[in-house]
Image (tube, rainbow, N blue to C red):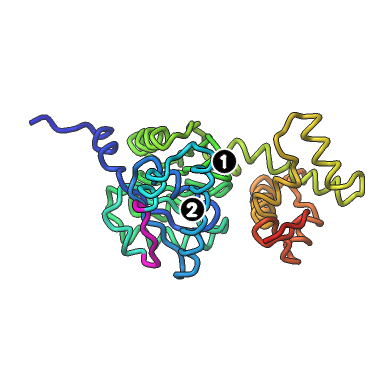
Amino acid sequence: MEQPSIKERNKMKIQSVGIIGAGTMGNGIAQVCAVAGLDVVMVDINDAAVQRGLDQISKSLDRLVKKETLTSSEKDAALKRIKGSTSYADLKGLGLVIEAATENQAIKEKILKQVDEIVSKETIIATNTSSLSITKLAALDSNPARFIGMHFFNPPPLMALVEVIRGLQTSDETHAAIIEMAKRVGKEPITVKNSPGFVVNRILLPMINEAFFVLSEGLASPEDIDAGMKLGCNQPIGPLALADLIGLDTCLAVMEVYFENFSDSKYRPCPLLREMVAAGYLGRKTGRGVYSYDK
């Protein structure tokens, strides 16, 4: 009997996905995978965090049903495919594990070391990092060839793009399997070399940071800055409103990575952005950022 090729084996293998992190990105990725027919295990540090993630997925699917882009039965089927958990042991036997935790090198390293010890050597491990080095994270893995970056955009159910980032060690088979899987869940993948911020955020975050400098210098109100970029550059959302959506803490963390890695003053985080993060004004998720939101 003819043996299946590596690519075919990978296609068969990724029928199940583990997501680490039930926050905005984690639950969004879980939803995308479940709607596409994959079995999902979504892991977070406690039951409350997991339940918040599951509730968010349910609300998001309800909105799709209301818009008639999803049926009630498809919603129910998707929810049944998602298992919430607080144990990494539930990641055993899955075809792919996507780490979608806080954008912090130390936290990601700790999580990825634990995952490496639990899953099989055939399981592909991906990180949803928006700025950290794939090569450096892969070096921690016992099988670095199976490690890759899979950067979804916020909110994952609505954004079509996935940046697929190869580390120096990433194998062609791992890359091919992730490209296929990204297409299968309805996304458009682009392949990117490993460099801080990759492609989209390397361009986007300095623009957001500059908007904070413009705001801090009192050149215009937040509303007028955002209106200017929407009406003048045809952007669907202004940079300050987008910062609130991404999370000001995430914006700051990414700019700090650029500043540290490129040693270039053009990536210096705006002091106002730093101050707002220190105050806990992180954007939509805390009810207040540049703008105020009803939680």
Seen at 61% across and 37% down, the residue is 200
Residue under circle 1? 195
Q: Nearer the viewer, residue 68 or 81?
A: 68
Seen at 28% across and 51% down, the residue is 121
Residue 151 in view, yes or no: no
User: Magenta residues, as a range?
Assistant: 80-87
Left or right of residue 26, residue 74 in this image: left
Q: Is residue 92 above or below residue 46?
A: above
x and y percentages locating residue 115 in the rendered image: 37, 59
Q: Nearer the viewer, mark 2 or mark 1?
A: 2
Seen at 39% across and 46% down, the residue is 34
x and y percentages locating residue 42 in the rendered image: 41, 57
Residue 57 — which label?
Answer: 2
Q: Is residue 39 above or below residue 234?
A: below
Tag 2–tag 1 contact (CB < 8 Å): no
Left or right of residue 199, residue 31 in this image: left
